[in-house]
Image (cartoon, rainbow, N blue to C red):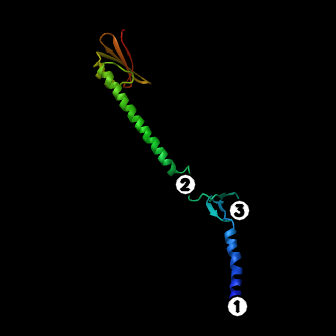
Amino acid sequence: MKNSMSSMVQLGYAAPALLAVVCSPAWAINKCTMADGKVVYQEVPCAVGGTTVNTSGAGQADANAEGPNYLKREAARLTSEENAQAATRARASRMSAAILGRKIVIGMTADEARQSWGEPSKINASVGSYGRHEQWVYPGSQYVYVQNGLVTGAQSPQ
């Protein structure tokens, strides 16, 4: 009977302690900014001006963190690069067709215009705050206007 009584006494002490651990609330973590500007995390409330840190999502990814957004940004960058490459291919195709058809297209480079119509018989040039502006003169009163290396217009007597 003594052993049984001793066990009950021990159980009598252990049960409330176990109950206190299981039923006690989770400790709050407080983020406190000290007088010298240092940030300290502690279990006790801050003396002045602190915030309680929510630890319920501890270990979960933050939607605004670098990692989760990296894949989205990388996909957008790749899509942007692919679009730029597709636009470059489309432009090259348009310019090749214009050169083969001996046409001038606004946005051509000066070299592409030369490939299309050949060397001009005369170039009238002016330089100002807007850059270099050229009027290329071709036989038959045809003109190509080039600004800073790009075709901006063309004129023919039709």
Position of the C terminus by quadrant: top left
- The answer for how far apart the CA atoms under marks 3 and 2 are is 31 Å
Question: Against 154, is 14 above or below?
Answer: below
Residue pointed to by mark 1: 2
- The answer for how far apart the CA atoms under marks 2 and 1 are is 56 Å
| Amino acid of disc 3 | Ala
Question: Against 34, is 98 above or below?
Answer: above
Provide residue 94's location: percent of width, then percent of height. Answer: 35, 25
**Rendered image quadrant of residue 74:** top left
Residue at horizontal 51%, vertical 48%? 69
First in sequence: mark 1 vs mark 3: 1
Q: Nearer the viewer, mark 3 or mark 2?
A: 2
Residue pointed to by mark 2: 61
In the picture, measured across the screen, residue 127 lies left or right of residue 58, that is: left
**Rendered image quadrant of residue 47:** bottom right
| Amino acid of disc 1 | Lys
Residue 33 shows in the view? no
Provide residue 70's location: percent of width, then percent of height. Answer: 48, 48
Residue 67 shows in the view? yes
- The answer for how far apart the CA atoms under marks 1 and 3 are is 52 Å
